């Protein structure tokens, strides 16, 4: 038996639209990953505690509400404070191109904007795992 | 003592999480076995529930409510939520904890989602070891959730002290589910979604089936509870029925009996898994098996004659005396 890649798909922030997140979760399952889905309106604290209990390799954050510049780095920061920054964080959702360099500087390792084909996300996971 | 085990006993969350991965991945069998053996003397204090029932019956929502009550009593709770892996991709979508996510930031609650995968010893083997990790780490309750459909899930349920079988009205084929053997494993019957039509009728049907069952097994009376997880109705009552049923099991020795039966199964299971592994190794050495296939195909030898002799050789080779 091989190690399975486990991925947490989480939605921080207040927006209640999780169609995109659910779509990604299902597509990653079909690609052979174990995906844990936690639903909408998760605090960074809940996301990080969930990631640690589930011992995931990746956290995929999805956000449409525009608060990504605060919430995504907050997740990375909390992971660091719990010595769990070996967990790789990537993000997706409605994120302006101009915000991406700042997010990467803050430890978000990849950002996928709407319309990114799933195979690009899978290729990223395979290269980073 | 093994470092990982020491951390688990200190209730280190990351160590517990990693230990479960170690078991699930089956990458380092020696380390896994050492971990479980080290934890074994610290096990046996947790109360283990299994919760099962058809998809969408409200098992996770009920657990969410039970956890709420147990936390008010200052009890710590670990949940192992088992879901099937896709037979096609090997992936899994693990969504049970979605319903319990309000407990995510509570340090007295640990929720772990587990995919059934293609485990060597079946998912039941991995679940059994995961229970031990939580038990040794000092959780008061360990609760396993599965979807009650097949043999695999029944095996998982057999790992618990008490099985809660959740049924709901409106599936149309309730009685079908009752006949399918799932009824056999239930200790407590919870009719959830009592806010929906048909709950009372379902209750009478379950009562009828149970009256037949209880007349055969005179040692137990199975409680039936009515709940609505979403409306937070009947939860306290269900919980006290579960607790007094458990107390009954504990006080008249049935709990110890149950746990011994579990150990018996576990030992048989480990033995067969290990013997199988040795047998496979033996068969594959130097392509032995391929050679025998050829001999049997060409009718140089017949299968029983060949294997009765070879198994003798095999037992010698693995020093089985
Ligand atoms: N009306 C009503 N709906 C309920 C009740 N309990 C749960 N539900 C709903 O039933 C659906 C499934 O609930 P879950 O708790 O996920 O059910 P489950 O049995 O864990 O489902 P699986 O794990 O997918 O098999 C959700 O939409 C709940 O809101 C209830 O008491 N009454
Ligand atoms: Mg569930």
Image (spheres, grey):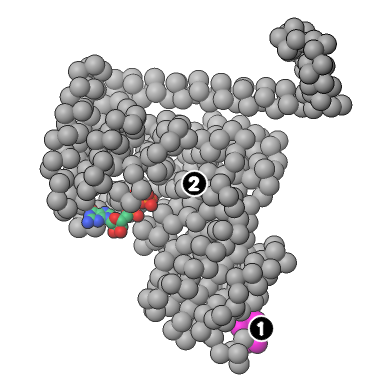
- Residue B84 has which mark? 2
Task: Out of B133 and B283, give the one closest to the viewer.
Answer: B283
From this viewpoint, is residue B17 visible?
no
Label 1 or label 2, whichever lies nearer to me, is 2
Q: Quadrant of residue B224?
A: top left
Decide: is B74 above or below B51: below
Q: Which residue is mark 1?
A: A105
Does residue B173 appear in this view? yes
Q: Tell whether position B204 is magenta.
A: no
Answer with left or right where residue B42 lies relative to residue B210: right
- Residue B20 picture location, percent across and down: 57, 46
Q: Which mark is residue B150?
A: none
Labels 1 and 2 positioned on one and the same chain: no
Residue drawn at point x = 59 percent, y = 41 percent: B118
Q: Could you say which quadrant of the image residue A95 lies in?
A: bottom right
Label 1 lies in ligand 1 vicinity (Cβ under 8 Å): no
**What segment is highlighted magenta in the picture?**
A101-105
Which quadrant, please, contains the C terminus of chain A? bottom right
Mark 1 touching mark 2, by CB under 8 A? no
Element on which disc 2 rests: loop
């Amino acid at each position: 038996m091989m190690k399975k890649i486990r991925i947490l798909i989480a939605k921080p922030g207040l927006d209640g639209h999780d169609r995109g997140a659910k779509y990604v979760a299902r597509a990653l399952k079909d690609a052979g990953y174990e995906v844990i889905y936690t639903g909408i309106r998760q605090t960074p604290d809940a996301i990080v505690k969930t990631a640690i209990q589930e011992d995931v390799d990746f956290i995929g954050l999805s956000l449409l509400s525009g608060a990504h510049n605060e919430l995504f780095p907050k997740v990375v920061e909390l992971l660091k404070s719990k010595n769990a920054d070996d967990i790789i964080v990537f993000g997706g959702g409605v994120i302006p191109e101009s915000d991406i360099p700042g997010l990467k500087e803050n430890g978000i390792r990849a950002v996928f904007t709407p319309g990114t084909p799933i195979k690009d996300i899978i290729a990223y996971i395979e290269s980073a795992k | 003592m093994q470092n990982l085990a020491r951390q688990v006993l200190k209730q280190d969350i990351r160590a517990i999480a990693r230990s479960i991965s170690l078991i699930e991945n089956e990458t380092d069998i020696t380390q896994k076995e050492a971990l479980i053996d080290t934890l074994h003397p610290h096990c046996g204090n947790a109360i283990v529930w299994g919760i099962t029932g058809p998809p969408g019956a409200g098992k996770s929502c009920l657990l969410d409510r039970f956890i709420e009550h147990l936390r008010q009593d200052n009890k710590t709770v670990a949940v192992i939520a088992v879901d099937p892996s896709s037979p096609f991709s090997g992936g899994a979508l693990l969504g049970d904890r979605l319903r319990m996510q309000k407990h995510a930031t509570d340090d007295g609650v640990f929720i772990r989602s587990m995919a059934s995968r293609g485990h060597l010893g079946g998912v039941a083997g991995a679940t059994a070891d995961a229970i031990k990790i939580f038990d040794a780490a000092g959780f008061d309750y360990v609760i396993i959730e599965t979807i009650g459909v097949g043999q695999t899930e029944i095996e998982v349920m057999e790992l618990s002290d008490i099985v809660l079988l959740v049924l709901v009205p409106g599936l149309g084929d309730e009685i079908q589910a009752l006949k399918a053997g799932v009824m056999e494993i239930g200790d407590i019957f919870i009719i959830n979604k009592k806010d929906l039509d048909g709950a009372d009728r379902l209750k009478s049907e379950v009562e009828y089936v149970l009256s037949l069952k209880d007349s055969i097994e005179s040692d137990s009376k199975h409680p039936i509870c009515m709940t609505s997880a979403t409306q937070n109705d009947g939860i306290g009552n269900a919980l006290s029925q579960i607790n007094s049923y458990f107390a009954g099991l504990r006080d008249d020795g049935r709990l110890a009996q149950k746990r011994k039966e579990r150990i018996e199964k576990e030992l048989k299971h480990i033995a067969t898994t290990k013997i199988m592994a040795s047998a496979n190794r033996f068969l594959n050495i130097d392509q032995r098996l391929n050679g025998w296939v050829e001999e049997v195909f060409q009718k140089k030898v017949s299968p029983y004659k060949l294997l009765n002799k070879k198994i003798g050789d095999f037992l010698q080779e693995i020093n089985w005396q």
